[in-house]
């Protein structure tokens, strides 16, 4: 037997950083959770108990905090690239670093109509993530994403015309609730070096804003024929809005709200156009995935 693949490092490294603007007194915060895994000529640490090739995971953790102190930690695409590039520059036997950053969205509070200088509130669950592979040989590949953005529309969604056979019980509908937890990702054209990432640093926040706005607008305004059809339109829009991206990927759970027949009680009408009370389902849920690429 031989080591066919290996990578190791530190996961769940929580980092908070504050920027204090002395002139205005405005403070800005960033909070993220980092996973940084290293890959390279490390097989002997597995096969021969040779620790001489091991940059300790504790040192990986220390490096994350040190680089966070010495450099900007936003946008997360920049910090992921900087962090990964550090390891392949510093250690000649490390040939790739795999960095995942989950950033937590502290939104500045508005108090008495004014943005508060140092108080923030967090939208439950929504994160902005980055997964980057920084490779000596292949350059820097970055995928950005929005995860955990829960949305619901109470109408404007239909699903009919699907396969009807001896396995089908689902009734067709022209008016249903649609709810999902958005997982939307966009893969950037490979960057040759960290300097190339740095040169594009202004593009990452704009892309995240565009992807989030597009997702919400299409979700709200598309007269949805299915999750599939709506997510494809979202993907087309993001590719058009962010020319430096190559592929857009969505994974959308279809979180079902079932109609509830109440007619057993004095003939109460609560289905079809009379439906008002529904039963939100925890599971099973649909899961619809797609990747849309250029050309
Ligand atoms: O939008 C939908 N897509 C599907 O594939 C599906 N299957 N059941 N309900 C569904 N809704």
Image (spheres, rainbow, N blue to C red):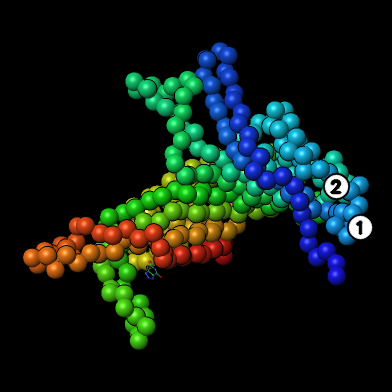
Compare residues 5 and 187 and report the one nearer the observer. Answer: 5
- Nearer mark to the viewer, of 1 and 2: 1
Q: Is residue 275 left or right of residue 217?
A: left
Rendered-image quadrant of the C terminus: bottom right
Q: In which quadrant will I find the N terminus?
A: bottom right
Q: Nearer the viewer, residue 143 or 165?
A: 165
Circle 1 residues within 10 Å: few <14, some 14–19, many ≥20: few
Q: Residue at x 88, y 60 (%)?
A: 47
Q: Position of residue 105 (x, y in %)?
A: 50, 37
Residue in the image at 64% along x and 50% along y: 131
Residue 278 visible within the image: yes
105 to 236, vertically: above or below: above
Task: Give residue 110's position: percent from left, percent from top.
Answer: 39, 25
Give the SS element for disc 1.
loop
Position of residue 15 in the picture relative to residue 192 (left or right): left
Which percent across, then down, holds residue 221?
Answer: 33, 54
Q: Quickly name the residue at label 1.
A: 48
Vertical relation: 281 (above or below) 128: below
Task: Measure the alpha-carbon separation of dots 1 and 2.
Answer: 12 Å
Residue 54 — which label? 2
Q: Residue furthest front?
A: 265
Q: Is mark 1 within 8 Å of ligand 1?
A: no
Disc nearer the start of the sequence (1/2) = 1
The image's mark for residue 197 is: none
């Amino acid at each position: 037997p031989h080591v066919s693949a290996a990578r190791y490092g530190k996961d769940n490294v929580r980092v908070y950083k504050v920027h204090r603007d002395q002139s205005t007194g405005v403070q800005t915060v960033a909070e993220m959770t980092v996973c940084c895994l290293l890959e390279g000529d490390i097989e002997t640490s597995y096969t021969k108990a040779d620790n001489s090739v091991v940059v300790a995971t504790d040192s990986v953790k220390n490096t994350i905090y040190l680089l966070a102190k010495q450099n900007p930690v936003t946008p997360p695409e920049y910090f992921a690239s900087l962090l990964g590039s550090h390891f392949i520059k510093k250690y000649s036997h490390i040939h790739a670093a795999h960095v995942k950053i989950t950033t937590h969205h502290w939104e500045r509070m508005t108090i008495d109509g004014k943005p508060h200088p140092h108080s923030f509130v967090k939208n439950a669950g929504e994160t902005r993530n980055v997964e980057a592979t920084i490779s000596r040989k292949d350059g820097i590949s970055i995928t950005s994403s929005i995860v955990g953005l829960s949305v619901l529309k109470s109408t404007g969604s239909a699903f009919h015309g699907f396969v009807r056979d001896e396995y089908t019980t689902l009734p067709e509908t022209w008016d249903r609730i649609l709810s999902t937890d958005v997982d939307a990702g966009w893969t950037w054209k490979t960057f040759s070096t960290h300097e190339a990432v740095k040169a594009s640093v202004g593009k990452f926040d704009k892309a995240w804003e565009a992807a989030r706005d597009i997702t919400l607008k299409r979700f709200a305004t598309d007269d949805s024929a299915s999750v599939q059809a709506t997510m494809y339109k979202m993907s087309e829009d993001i590719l058009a809005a962010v020319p430096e991206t190559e592929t857009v990927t969505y994974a959308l759970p279809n979180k079902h709200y079932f109609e509830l027949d109440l007619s057993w009680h004095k003939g109460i009408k609560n289905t079809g156009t009379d439906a008002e009370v529904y039963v939100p389902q925890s599971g099973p849920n649909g899961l619809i995935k797609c990747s849309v690429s250029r050309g």
